[in-house]
C-alpha cells in the first residue's frame, strides 16, 4: 500500500486502512453543512478561518479541498475503504451540488458505472478522485492490474461515446458471423435411421409402421438442431441505431438499448460488448474520423 494516497480522514497503519476520527468529524461536518444548504465556498472559508491545519494553506485551496471531499465516493465505502458517512448522506450532499442540468450527467454516470467491468477479474470498475480532484476510473479489486487509475473521466466517456457514434454512422459494424442453425445428429438419430433401413428391407413393407418411424426420425433430427438468434438480434440492433444521430456526449438511451457491458482490458483498452456479442474496442484514431 506504500505510495497510495488516501483521502483526508484515513491513515494506513499496521497493514490496514483506519479512520482518523478527528479528521472524520470534519468530513461529516462538511457533508452535513452542505446538506443544510451551506455552499462549498462558505464551508471552505469557515474551515480556513478556524485555522484547521488541512485547510490553512490558502482560502482558495480550502474551497477546493471541500469540493474534493464532497465528490469522493470513498467516504461511504467505495473501493473497500471503511465508511465515514452513509451513501445516503453522500447522495443528499451531492444533490445539493447539482443543478437541473447536472441530473442528466449523474444518471449518465450511474448507468456507465453499473455497466462497467474489469475484464481481468470481472468486477465492477470503481470511480474515484485524484488528490487534485480529477475523476478517474479503476478496478475496485485489490491487487488487480487495473487497480492503478490511469483512465480519467473524460477519456472513459469519450471512448464510449466514440464507439456509439461510430456504430450510429455505420450500423454494419455490428455484424457478426453466425449460423442460423447447426445440426449435430445424436445416437438416437442413427438408431432411427438404421431401423428404417431394416424395415424397408423387410418384405412386405409395413407402410404404417415405417411412416411412424419416419416421423419419429424427423422429430429427433429437429431436436438436434441448435437455432442461433444472433442474426435476428443483430438486425434489431441495426434497426435501433438507425433511429439515432451521433452525439457529443454518451447517449445513455442508446447505450441501454444495444449494449450489455463496457469492459476494460489489462492494457487499459475500453470496449463495448453489444447484445449480439459483438465487441468494439476504442482506438485513438477513431475519434478523429
Image: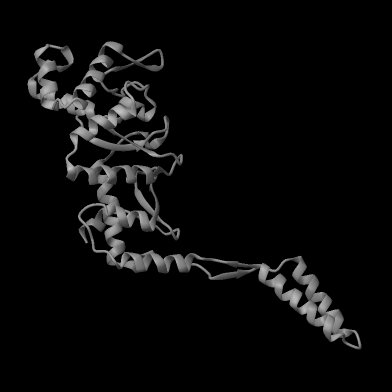
Closer-to-camera residue (213/35): 35
Which residue is most to the right?
203
Residue at image position (91%, 87%) is 203
Q: Is residue 268 left or right of residue 155?
A: right
Residue 105 higher or lower than 29, as above or below:
below
Examine the image and state in which quarter residue 52 appears. Answer: top left
Looking at the picture, the colour scheme in use is one colour
Q: Is residue 272 visible?
A: yes
Q: Is residue 57 visible?
A: no
Which residue is most to the bottom?
204
Residue 4 higher or lower than 22, as above or below:
below
Q: Position of residue 284 (x, y in %)?
A: 26, 53
Residue 185 higher or lower than 164, as above or below:
below
What is the count of numbered marks? 0
Which residue is most to the front?
36
Residue at image position (66%, 71%) is 222
Q: Position of residue 79 (x, y in %)?
A: 37, 30
Residue at image position (30%, 30%) is 73
Q: Position of residue 220 (x, y in %)?
A: 72, 70
- The quarter of the picture where the C terminus appears is bottom left
Residue 37 higher or lower than 54, as above or below:
below
Examine the image and state in which quarter residue 90 appears. Answer: top left
Q: Position of residue 57 (x, y in %)?
A: 11, 17
Examine the image and state in which quarter residue 251 appears. Answer: bottom left
- The quarter of the picture where the N terminus appears is top left
Residue at image position (40%, 67%) is 236
Amino acid at each position: 500500500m506504500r505510495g497510495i494516497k488516501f483521502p483526508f480522514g484515513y491513515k494506513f497503519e499496521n497493514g490496514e486502512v483506519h479512520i482518523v476520527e478527528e479528521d472524520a468529524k470534519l468530513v461529516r461536518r462538511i457533508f452535513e453543512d452542505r446538506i443544510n444548504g451551506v455552499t462549498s465556498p462558505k464551508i471552505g472559508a469557515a474551515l480556513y478561518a478556524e485555522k484547521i491545519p488541512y485547510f490553512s494553506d490558502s482560502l482558495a485551496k480550502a474551497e477546493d479541498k471541500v469540493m474534493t471531499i464532497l465528490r469522493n465516493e470513498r467516504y461511504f465505502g467505495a473501493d473497500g475503504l471503511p465508511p465515514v458517512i452513509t451513501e445516503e448522506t453522500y447522495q443528499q450532499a451531492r444533490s445539493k451540488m447539482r443543478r437541473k442540468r447536472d441530473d442528466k450527467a449523474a444518471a449518465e454516470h450511474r448507468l456507465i458505472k453499473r455497466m462497467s467491468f474489469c475484464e481481468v477479474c470481472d468486477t465492477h470498475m470503481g470511480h474515484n478522485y485524484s488528490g487534485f480532484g480529477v475523476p478517474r476510473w479503476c478496478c475496485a479489486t485489490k491487487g488487480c492490474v487495473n487497480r492503478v487509475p490511469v483512465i480519467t473521466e473524460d477519456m472513459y466517456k469519450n471512448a464510449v461515446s466514440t464507439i456509439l457514434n461510430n456504430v450510429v454512422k455505420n450500423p454494419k459494424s455490428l455484424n457478426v458471423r453466425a449460423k442460423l442453425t447447426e445440426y449435430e445428429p445424436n445416437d438416437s438419430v442413427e438408431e432411427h435411421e438404421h431401423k428404417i433401413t431394416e424395415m424397408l428391407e423387410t418384405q412386405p413393407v409395413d407402410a404404417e409402421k415405417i411412416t411412424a418411424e419416419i416421423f419419429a426420425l424427423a422429430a429427433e433430427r429437429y431436436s438436434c438442431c441448435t437455432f442461433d438468434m444472433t442474426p435476428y438480434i443483430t438486425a434489431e440492433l441495426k434497426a435501433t441505431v438507425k433511429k439515432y444521430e451521433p452525439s457529443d456526449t454518451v447517449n445513455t438511451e442508446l447505450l441501454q438499448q444495444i449494449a450489455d457491458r463496457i469492459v476494460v482490458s489489462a492494457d487499459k483498452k475500453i470496449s463495448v460488448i453489444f447484445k449480439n456479442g459483438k465487441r468494439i474496442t476504442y482506438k485513438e484514431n477513431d475519434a478523429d474520423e
